[in-house]
Every structure is written in C-alpha cells, then in structure tokens.
C-alpha cells in the first residue's frame, strides 16, 4: 500500500490595513450617546443665553445714552437761548459726547437714567435758578459798563473844561494872554479818545 504525504501549506498574509480588519466593533452605549447630546444642547443653549444677555445690556446702554443726549440737547436750547454767544461752544457734538459720558457714569453708579436724574429736586432747583443767575450776571455787567461810561464821560468833560479858555469846572477865571510866538493850542478829538478807552475797558472785562 502506497504512503500518502501532505504538502505543507504556506499561510496567506493579510495585507489589509488594520482599520479594515474584520474586528468586532465596540457596542454603542445608548446612555452615553444621550448624555453627549444633552451636553451639546446645554452648550448651545448657554451660548444663546449669553448672547441674549449681551444684546440686552447693549440695548439698555443705547437707551441710556439716548436719554442723556436728549437731556443735554434740551439744556443746550435753554443755555443758548439765554446766552446766544455760547452757541459756538454748546454744539450738538459736544452735547452728545457729554450725554454718552453721563450714561457711562449712570451705568456705574446707578443713577436710574436721565429721567430719574432730572426728576431730582436739586436738578430742578438748578434749572429753575439758571435764568435768574444769568439775568443777574448780565445786569451786574451792564451796570459796571454804565459806570465806566459815566466815569469816562466825566473825565472827558473835565478835560474839555481844562482846554476851554477861562473855564475850570463850574468856576471861571480870566482868560490867559497867549504868548506872542506860541500858536493857539488845538482842541483834542475827545470822541476818538473816548472810543479808544471804551473799547479797551470793554474787552478787559
């Protein structure tokens, strides 16, 4: 009887990548997947809430700035109406800048907005007293100018009396004989002198 022999078989090497090996996939944990979904939803919700809060704060600040700017424009009308010369100083841009600065102060110190601040008794007192203060200052200045004009007129009259021959104030004296070789003195132009002094004293205020 012939003897049967078996040829040794050469193993076939699997050249596929490890990721393509037939390996058993890890089972998916349903609870872990649900937890991850909840975490993602919470993060998205937190981001939306944070954005909504930032938008609300910005809107509140914008309203605060608008209120103070409106108040400053109202104050501008009062001041410029009382003192028209301040119009180049109390400009719209400067009033808006002051209003924005007041709004930032309000946001820090909690004044309660322009309406709340303007309703303060002290602010109401200041607004009511402002026209009286302006009128009083203008009256005092006008009186001072009138006194200066009166003083200048008195000095001019005294100078005129000294120049006129034979007159010194209310008293009289004999006319002095002019020197033979000296021409008569020319009467100075008092109007020009008064205008010069008035202009100088007025701008010196």
Image (spheres, helix red, strand yellow):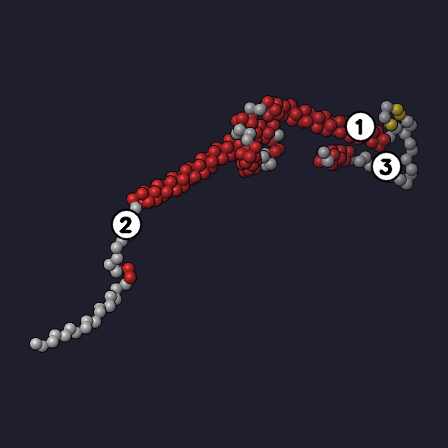
Question: In percent of the image, x 22 and y 68: which residue is there?
Answer: 12
Q: Which residue is mark 3?
A: 184
CA gap, disc 2 to disc 3? Answer: 132 Å
Q: Give x and y (percent) for residue 79.
A: 59, 29
Q: Quadrant of the N terminus?
A: bottom left
Q: Give x and y (percent) for residue 185.
A: 85, 37
Q: Earlier in the sequence, mark 1 or mark 3?
A: 1
Question: In percent of the image, x 21 and y 71: which residue is there?
Answer: 10
**Left-right relation of 37 to 159:** left
Q: Is residue 129 above or below residue 43?
A: above
Comparing 122 with 54, the one in front is 54
Q: Which residue is mark 2?
A: 27
Residue furthest to the left:
1
Q: Quadrant of the C terminus?
A: top right
Q: Give x and y (percent) for residue 36.
A: 34, 44
- Asked where in the image residue 127 lies, by quadrant, the reply is top right
Q: Secondary structure at mark 1?
A: helix
Q: Which residue is mark 1?
A: 154
Comparing 42 with 90, the one in front is 42
Question: In percent of the image, x 57 and y 32: which residue is there?
Answer: 109
């Amino acid at each position: 009887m012939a003897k049967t022999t078996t040829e040794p078989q050469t193993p076939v090497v699997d050249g596929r990548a490890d990721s393509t090996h037939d390996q058993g996939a890890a089972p998916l944990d349903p609870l872990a997947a649900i937890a991850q979904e909840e975490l993602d939803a919470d993060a998205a919700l937190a981001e939306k809430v944070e954005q909504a809060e930032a938008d609300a704060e910005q809107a509140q600040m914008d309203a605060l700035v608008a209120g103070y700017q409106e108040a400053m424009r109202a104050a501008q009308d009062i001041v410029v109406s009382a003192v028209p010369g301040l119009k180049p100083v109390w400009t719209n841009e400067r009033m808006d800048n002051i209003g924005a600065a007041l709004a930032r102060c309000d946001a820090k110190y909690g004044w309660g907005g322009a309406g709340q601040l303007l309703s303060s008794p002290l602010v109401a007192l200041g607004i009511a007293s402002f026209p009286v203060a302006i009128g009083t200052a203008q009256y005092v200045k006008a009186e001072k100018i009138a006194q200066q004009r009166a003083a200048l007129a008195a000095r001019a009259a005294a100078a005129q009396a000294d120049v006129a021959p034979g007159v010194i104030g209310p008293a009289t004296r004999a006319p002095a004989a002019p020197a033979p070789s000296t021409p008569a003195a020319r009467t100075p132009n008092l109007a020009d002198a008064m205008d010069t002094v008035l202009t100088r004293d007025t701008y010196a205020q």
